[in-house]
């Protein structure tokens, strides 16, 4: 990417809002394996809006808890700290979207794709036997992998709208259409955004390279790549890119099977779509 285009992209990203301080602190604490759970709970409970939305989510029919949960502490006991962290991040991410953007980018469809990708990415991480904390980070990677599109929809609406149309007309991967017509793609925007949000290096790498088909030593990136294609196959939402990219050999090797076999091995994925829709309805 040429320097003037890089400078323009950085300027756009700088205009994007930061996560609320509470969410930034939750992320910092959860990246620290020695951070006490009670401190994470305390940070969330100090944000009343987030607390209300998380409690509304966990008391929904999706989780099917036998009794109503009235505190974040009790929510952690019943659902686990990683689930509550992911809900906090999901609530914050949804609050950043402008559903009246001039690019005509449908943010509900975008969120459904992002949340589905997040859940599948977490499922794939568990399948690889990754630690629970890394499975949770794979969810974060899936949730945020396409947020570079939000930057483009917000600050380059005419150009992004044209690219969405070109991608659809040509059946061309959106990131390639962006590179051809804009000069940079949503993954590059997402990388800068992830760095602004002070995400971990592995998360930044996964978001920056989620269309990269070269060999990877980052299992989070591989889970995200596979989950993104599976989400598109499910037609769960719409991130503006319907093209399903074939699995490169190293992804087949990572999961021990090709694309269609992996989908079959994951079983019924409809529950994931239901979970995503329940979060969007908050």
Image (cartoon, rainbow, N blue to C red):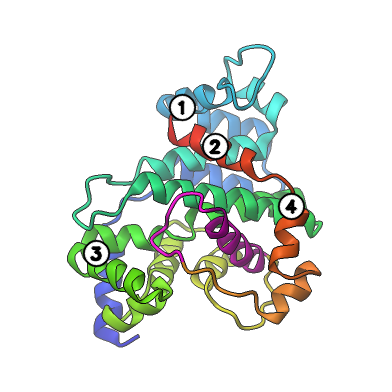
In-image side of 177 versus 237 (left or right): left
Q: What is the secondary structure assignment of the residue under circle 2?
A: helix
* Distance between the alpha carbons at the discs numbered 3 and 2: 30 Å
According to the picture, the residue beneath numbered tag 4 turns out to be 266
Q: Quadrant of residue 147?
A: bottom left
Q: Residue at x 31, y 66 (%)?
A: 164
Q: Which mark is residue 87?
A: 2
Which mark sits nearer the N-terminus, 4 or 2?
A: 2
Front residue of 195 and 125: 125
Residue 215, x across and y down, in percent: 66, 82
Report whether 11 appears left or right of 243: left
Q: Gap in Å between the C-alphas at discs 4 and 2? A: 23 Å
Question: Which mark is nearer the camera, 4 or 2?
Answer: 4
- Mark 3 neighbour class, 10 Å CA radius: few under 14, some 14 to 19, many 20 or more: some
Residue for point 46% across, 27% down: 53
Horizontal and vertical percent for residue 183? 30, 82
The residue singled out by tag 1 in the image is: 53
The mark nearer the N terminus, 2 or 1, is: 1
Rendered view: 103 above or below 1: above
Viewer-nearest of discs 1 and 4 = 4
Q: Is residue 200 visible?
A: no
Question: Gap in Å between the C-alphas at discs 3 and 4?
Answer: 34 Å
Q: Are circles 2 and 1 on residues that touch, CB within 8 Å?
A: yes
Marked residue nearer the N-terminal end (3 or 4): 3
Q: Are the residues tagged 3 and 4 within 8 Å (C-beta)?
A: no
């Amino acid at each position: 990417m040429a320097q003037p285009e890089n400078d323009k992209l950085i300027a756009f990203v700088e205009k994007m809002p930061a996560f609320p301080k509470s969410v930034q602190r939750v992320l910092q604490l959860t990246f620290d394996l020695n951070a006490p759970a009670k401190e994470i709970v305390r940070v969330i409970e100090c944000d009343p809006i987030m607390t209300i939305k998380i409690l509304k989510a966990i008391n929904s029919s999706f989780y099917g808890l036998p009794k109503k949960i009235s505190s974040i502490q009790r929510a952690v006991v019943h659902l686990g700290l990683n689930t509550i962290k992911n809900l906090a991040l999901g609530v914050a991410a949804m609050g950043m979207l402008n559903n009246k953007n001039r690019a005509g980018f449908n943010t509900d469809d975008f969120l459904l794709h992002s949340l589905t990708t997040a859940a599948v990415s977490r499922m794939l991480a568990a399948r690889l036997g990754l630690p629970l904390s890394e499975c949770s980070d794979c969810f974060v990677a899936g949730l945020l992998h396409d947020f570079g599109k939000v930057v483009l929809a917000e600050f380059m609406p005419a150009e992004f709208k044209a690219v969405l149309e070109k991608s659809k007309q040509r059946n061309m991967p959106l990131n390639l259409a962006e590179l051809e017509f804009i000069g940079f793609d949503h993954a590059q925007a997402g990388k800068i955004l992830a760095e602004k949000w002070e995400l971990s290096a592995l998360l930044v790498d996964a978001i920056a390279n989620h269309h990269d088909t070269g060999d990877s030593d980052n299992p989070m990136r591989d889970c995200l790549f596979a989950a993104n294609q599976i989400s598109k196959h499910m037609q769960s939402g719409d991130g503006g890119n319907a093209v399903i990219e074939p699995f490169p050999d190293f992804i087949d090797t990572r999961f021990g099977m090709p694309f269609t076999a992996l989908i079959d091995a994951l079983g019924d994925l409809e529950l994931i779509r239901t979970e995503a829709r329940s979060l969007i309805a908050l």
